[in-house]
Amino acid sequence: MASSSPSVPLSLDLRSPSSPRSFCIFRAPPDSTNPFESAIETAVIFGTERGSLHYRCYPDGDDRDGLLQPLETSRNVQPINQMNVVSGSIVSISYLGPSIFLILIDDNRGPSASQPGVYASQLITLRGNTFHPLPIKTPRISCATTSALTDLGLVYASGRQIANLTHESFVSSEMMTKSFNLETALPLPGIRAGHDAIEVTCGAQIVVAAVGSTFYAVSISSGVSTKILSFQNSSQVHPILVRDFQDRSTDWSALLLCSGRDCAVMDLWKPPEEGDVTAVQRHSIQTQSPILNIASSWPWLVLLTSDGLISMRSPSCLAIPLRTMEVGTRPNDFFLLQKTPHDQTMLASLSYGGECILIKCSPDNEQDLADRLMRLSIDAFGANGFPRAEVAETLSASFTATSYVGPEANASARSLLKQYLEAVLGLADFVSGSTSLWPGGEGTSTICATALLCLVCTQDTPDAALANRAAKEACVGVTFNDRLDASVRVCDQAADRMLREATQSIDLLKASKAISSTNKANLPLEFTEAAIWLMRACGRHERAFEILEQRLSVDGWSKIKYESYAATHLSDLWSHPDGRALVLRLDATRQLLESNPGLGLSVFTASHPRNCQQWQAMTGREDPLNAKPSDVIKLLKSIKPLVKENETLSTDENAPPPLDTGRALTVAFLESAIGINTGRPTQEEMIDSLLPDEATIDLTEKLHDELSYLLLEGIISERGDNDSGEDSPRGKIYRSKLRQFLRWPLAKVNAERLLESLPSSFLEEQALLLGRLGRHHDALRILYVQCKSLDLALAYCDSRHKHKKVGEGCAYLPLIRVALDSDPDQTQSSAIQVLAMRSNVINRSAALRLLPKSVPVSAVARPFLIPALVDSESEIRRLTLAAALLRAKYLSLKQQLTNAQIKAQSTLQGTPQLRAMNLGEPLHSTKPIRVRPSHTASSTFPEVTIVKHFFTRHLVIQAKVTNSATSTEGRTLGDIAFVVADSSEEAIQPNTNVTLKALPFQATGSSWCVLSAIPNRMDGIAILTCELHYVVSGADAFGTSISFGSATGGRTYVEELQDLEVHAAHFS
């Protein structure tokens, strides 16, 4: 169905001899007898004041002068008194299911003690464009509702009773069945009647209805009713209305309640177990005219009032109509609203004159929002009470809206602006949530609207909590703005106003002897936070830090809170490439590093990877070494922390160094950036992929050198002038970290230059550097001879073995040479200990060749030779067993693959070669016939069955082969091909052969032969000379076939078969 604009609505033709009183719009039934059924989209049933029902169907796209004409076949009228019920006005029609409806009739009898319902009711069905009553007697009903979102069927009320009719009642058409019946759910005098006076909500757990002007929530499970709202001054002349507007919450439901001119939005919650209903009223207003009907189209509410206005409003701000449209030519003409079934944003409204208009609920565009916000701001602050020119420039408001002269500013207008801004920015305090109405949700317009909300929160009764929350929500991501454009000037004025309000609140609090309210005590802090967040939102980060520093002493912020705010803000800035230069030059960065070195350092290290997976997922551009590391190092070196770390220090090499100097801060930063202790991948190809260009590699080498010299400097400086050779506790940590770094395989230090800088007493460090230069013999000599430590030498060799590259020799052989050269008694040499301890990884033959001839065999037999022989035999047995297991698994997989290939080649449609020829469907196929060899067959000849498939221009011969010959038991047949060697007719000749690659014993597979045929040129019978080619595979030592996938290496057989006959008539 075509949509309409709010100014020129699309109309449905509902004219009839009598005035409509109710209607129901739904999808046309699929069993309609209308010849244009495929074009039908919407159907309407409406009841009139004289008791007649009308059924109209409307085709899609039939739009003539804005009026949709119904199909002629659906212009049937069924008076209600012809359906064996009392006459009267039809006040309600409810759609219960396909072609089933409930109608309520005002028979002017009213309720009674035995029948408390206001209206008579009747279930009807629509068949063949005519109405028929269902043979179910229904009670008198005051109001009813049904919803596709629940399985309760029809929920109705009469007097104090609330009950339901299940879907089975409508389908069986025999008797009423109820899943609940609450006889005394409501207080006296009972429920108020009306078309939309009852609603099922909270996941079909609660029924909301009204008694007089009071709304009750009734639990279906317990029958307990809870009073949720009462309109004190509302009359009962106009309808009572309740609507669940289907918000997006799963736990709470949002309701719109109306009576007369009163209107309210409520949140409702029912616990899953038995418990009290929780109801929270959010907004309430009084309209200028009584409300006749309501509808919802999330996230909007639509009100129809007696003055002929339809207004679209937000649940967060009922007081301001977002869109208003005038309908009808006189008051009280249009009286009903209902959603259309094909489009939940399209509403239908019906008038007493028989006119039905369709209204599209569309959101405001940015221009509408800007102009409305401009007018509301002028009403709230006055023409000169806010930065009007800057706001207009930021919002791009029209000249008409900017030049608007409103009434004198007052508190009511400011409250209205506050509600509107909450709705527009999605800040409404709904438990079920709220949605922003501003297109895009971000940008300077949103920031400007936030600044206006902060400004209005300082007026009248200050609301610092809302201002703070709004400013935080506006701070999405990190923005930078060095120019004082219009939006920034608006934010500056709002921030200054909030800071003045915070200062005034502090003065009032100081003047007061007692603080009577916690909210008042928190007011200065909330406004200060809001000002800081607002500055961040508009990109004025330096101004935000100025406010933070200025208010530290004024607002009485604790040191911990101040440092936490500063660290969070600096970390956010550092995560953005454009904010790093700002972080490095801010005084707040230096102050944080000096007062709290650990927290300040986290500003630069928070984004570094923390484990191997994060390093592997990182791209080259995300490498911490690409984030201005040289500038960070320069800053950290200049820091002089004001705190001293505890003298009790850990000697764990993974422990952070004491952060009491700029050097310690720099070391901690470099270790985090390089990834020594966070599992940076040790593969050389991984580090190369992270550092793709030469300049970055040079930078890496410089930073690694910087770290090594800083650690060396830390060791030496901790010793002082009296070098006793003993390290202080801090010096031990630095030394441990230096050794750890030099052992790290990814370290890219200039080993020669660092080796020249090392003091002579740094023996282990010298050995590690010599190793990086490839001088392993010299390194091991230092560790074994000078340090006199076999453990250090073995650890060195173990590290080399662990990170050994392809082509490198055995890591332990240099140690054996050093031990043999150094030990005076070669029979007691440590070389034999090395052979014994590393016999499983050492190159045994090369190690034995290094031993001098003077070493007797007995010296190495027990510690080395015998264990080596035992290990070798065990390894042979293990590898033999593993090979057998792998072979068994391999053969099993090959057999499964062969079976799958045989199955796929067993049909015409499943064989890829045949499917690619696009032969189409066969004309017919012959019965299977078994063929025999024309001469004496070999003992390996399999069983062959032939099926001929005839196509228009082709003949396909399927040879089903079974490997059943006793002489081939356990062997595979391979490369099986059915071949037509010769044909007596030129009109039918071989084209393609599809070979069966492998056929295990006792298996059946198909080989195919395709012949091209020209039937109309065949003179008579064509004789085909056929052969079967196959290969018999060999067998292994265990009697297992060598290969399932092929039969190469076996003997090839060619068997001549009986001739086949083909007639031209077979192709017809």
Image (cartoon, rainbow, N blue to C red):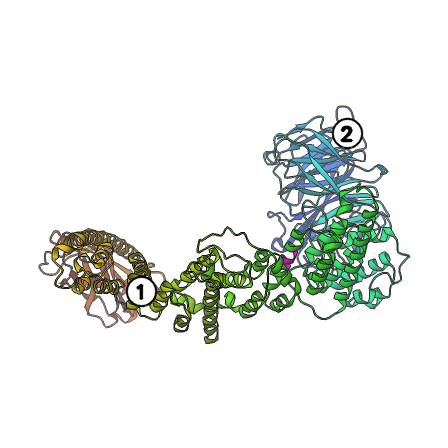
Q: Are marks 1 and 2 in contact (CB under 8 Å)?
A: no
* Picture coordinates of residue 912, whole percent (x, y): 32, 63
* Picture coordinates of residue 114, whole percent (x, y): 75, 24
Image-quadrant location for residue 996: bottom left
What residue do we see at 83% from left, 68% from top? Answer: 399
Q: Residue furthest front?
A: 722
- Residue 218: mark: none
Q: Residue furthest top?
A: 114
Where are the magenta residues, as a range? 565-569
Establish if 121 lies above or below 851: above
Which one is in front, 397 or 219? 397
Disc 1 residue type? Ile
Establish if 253 lies above or below 609: above
Which one is in front, 60 or 1058? 60
- The residue pinned by badge 2 equals 190
Establish if 602 lies above or below 111: below
* Picture coordinates of residue 1, whole percent (x, y): 67, 57
Q: Main secondary structure of the magenta part?
A: helix
Image-quadrant location for residue 439: bottom right
